[in-house]
Amino acid sequence: MSMTYSCGILGLGSSLPEKVLTNYDLEKIVDTSDEWISKRTGISQRRVLDEDKPAYQLGVDAAKKALDDAGIEAEELDLIIVTTETPDYLTPSMSCIIQSKIGAQKAAAFDLNAACSGFIYGMTIANQFIKSGYYKHVLVVGCEGLSKIVDWKDRNTCVLFGDGAGAAVLGPVEEGYGIITTHIGADGVLGKNITMPCCYIGPEDIQVRSGDNKKVLWMDGSEVFKFAVRIMEQATNKVLEDSGLSMEDIKLIVPHQANIRIIEGAAKRLKVSEDKIFTNLHKYGNISSASIPLGLNEAYREKLISKGDNLVLVGFGGGLTWGSVLVRWSK
Ligand code: UT7
């Protein structure tokens, strides 16, 4: 006899570096202004790691808090998925480092790179393992140190990003609660719009336009902007349709925090009032795959969600990729 389980979020945690970099600080680094950044993005400040600090420490801290919130010991974890586009090392993976630092001896561990959509991809995989009964507890950590890869001479990108981590412990929950449906997608044809060289730097395959082929992040902001507004709407509608719910049934949307104008544009298309949409990007900027778990954790700690509430988590990013999850809160 085969059994299936409902998979939900048992615990959440997040972690941020202490150092705050304001728009005014950035005025001293590149030709920009607080007015431009605030108006065009909604960001006022971001957190950044000290140069000599690895990003995985944020992931370790977030993971410990999520385990604590779930009331689960690290030894009880079966799998750790770390979603990141800024691993401190290609090997060992960030997930293996975090596994050792939290003492999760029993857990398998791998990194997943779907850029800013990573956490949604991670939740989607965790859901499959738990639903099938193959694993009981999966830790998904979005962990990013974007300050280490942005080009601090490029005002088009360096004002947008920040560092941080958010973690969730997923496991079996009461039937009818937890993850109702998930949706992930990719369009590699559009990948050239956000690039970050790694092992290979050269003219082949994709047009890597990072300044002078340096190992820095490069982005065609307006192309990504147009894609983002469209895909946020589509991905949100997809999980609503698949779960047979309508926007009225949704308590809160936690979107990827890239630009307030992207969120407003998507909200308008979805005909949803902005008070249903969680935002914190003014404080942290875009933290790639950490932004959704960090936002969800803040919404949870601020008691904006309670048991039975339907939530939509939705994101997009490099790849280009996108994803959405509909969760019925089970805590
Ligand atoms: O997580 C997924 C990855 N990324 C994103 O989601 C980002 C998506 N894109 C965006 O958020 C927006 O496109 C940006 C915030 C990147 C740019 O905003 P925009 O309204 O699309 O501006 P733009 O790129 O059209 O640039 C407008 C002007 C340009 O000057 P000119 O050519 O019109 O003279 C830029 O050089 O603004 C200039 N500019 C700046 N000025 C002051 C670009 N960055 C800055 C800056 N400070 N930091």
Image (cartoon, rainbow, N blue to C red):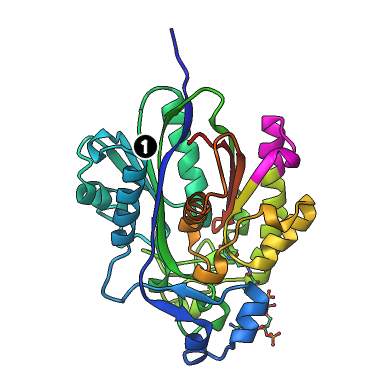
Depth order, front residue of 238/291: 291
Q: Which residues are magenta?
A: 237-251
Residue 41 location (% of width, % of height): 63, 73
Q: Quadrant of residue 273?
A: bottom right
The residue indicated by pointer 1 is 138
State the image quarter where residue 149 is shown: bottom left
Type of amino acid at the residue the image marks with label 1: Val
- Disc 1 within 8 angstroms of ligand 1 (CB): no
User: In the drawing, does residue 81 fall left or right of residue 306?
Assistant: left
Whether the magenta-drawn stretch holds residue 245 is answered as: yes
Picture quarter with the N terminus: top left
Ligand 1 image-quadrant field: bottom right
Check the image and name the residue furthest to the top. 1
Q: Residue at x 50, y 49 (%)?
A: 300
> In the image, is 27 to the left or to the right of 314?
left
As helix, strand or loop, the secondary structure at mark 1 comes to: strand
Image vertical order of residue 26 relative to residue 5, above or below: below
The answer to whether residue 223 is above or below residue 141 is below
Q: Which residue occupies 62% across, 67% down?
A: 259
Place of residue 45 in the rendered image (x, y in percent of width and height, measured from the top left): 51, 76
Q: Nearer the viewer, residue 42 or 210?
A: 42
